[in-house]
Image (spheres, helix red, strand yellow):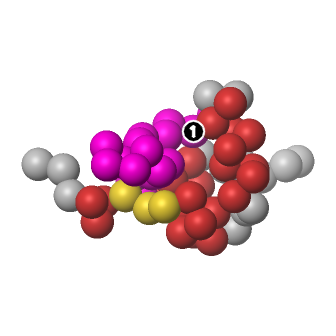
């Protein structure tokens, strides 16, 4: 079962990742991050699990 608490708004997701909200919008266009829409107001929502996975996939530069 899905819970709204499993999702973050664009502002909360940006803060969680340490990037700007516009960065998330760009990543959406580039299909780097999966975006869900609230069925009532069409606001962008991000699964916290997806964002955690994105952070885990970051690799250090050599």
Which residue corresponds to the image point at 67% horizontal and 49% vertical from the top-left? 24
Residue 17: x percent and y percent? 63, 63
Q: Which residue lies at the image location 63% right of the left edge and 63% below the top edge?
A: 14
Q: Is residue 41 magenta?
A: yes
Q: In the rendered image, which residue does mark 1 sit on? A: 33
Q: Does residue 43 appear to the left or right of 58 in the view shown?
A: left
Q: Position of residue 28 (x, y in %)?
A: 63, 36
Within 10 Å of the Cα at label 1, are there few (<14), some (14-19), or many (20+) other Cα atoms?
some
Q: Is residue 54 left or right of residue 7?
A: right
Q: Which residues are magenta?
A: 32-49
Work out whether residue 33 or residue 57 is closer to the camera in this orientation and state it.
33
- State the image coordinates of residue 15 (x, y, percent, origin top left): 62, 71
- Does the magenta-highlighted stretch encompass residue 52? no
Image-quadrant location for residue 26: top right
Toward the viewer: 41 or 48?
A: 41
Numbered label tally:
1
Relative image position of residue 54 (x, y in whole percent):
56, 48
The answer to whether 45 is drawn above or below residue 5 in the figure is: above
**At x 75% / y 50%, what residue is drawn?**
23
Residue 3 appearing in the image: yes
Circle 1 SS class: loop
Q: Is residue 51 above or below residue 15?
A: above
Name which residue lies at 57% across and 39% down. Answer: 33
Q: Residue furthest right?
A: 62
As drawn, the residue found furthest toward the left would be 1
């Amino acid at each position: 079962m899905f819970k709204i608490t499993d999702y973050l708004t664009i502002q909360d997701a940006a803060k969680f990742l340490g990037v700007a909200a516009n960065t998330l919008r760009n990543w959406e266009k580039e299909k780097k991050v999966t975006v869900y829409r609230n069925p009532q107001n069409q606001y962008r929502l991000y699964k916290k699990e997806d964002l955690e996975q994105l952070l885990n996939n970051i690799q250090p530069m050599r």
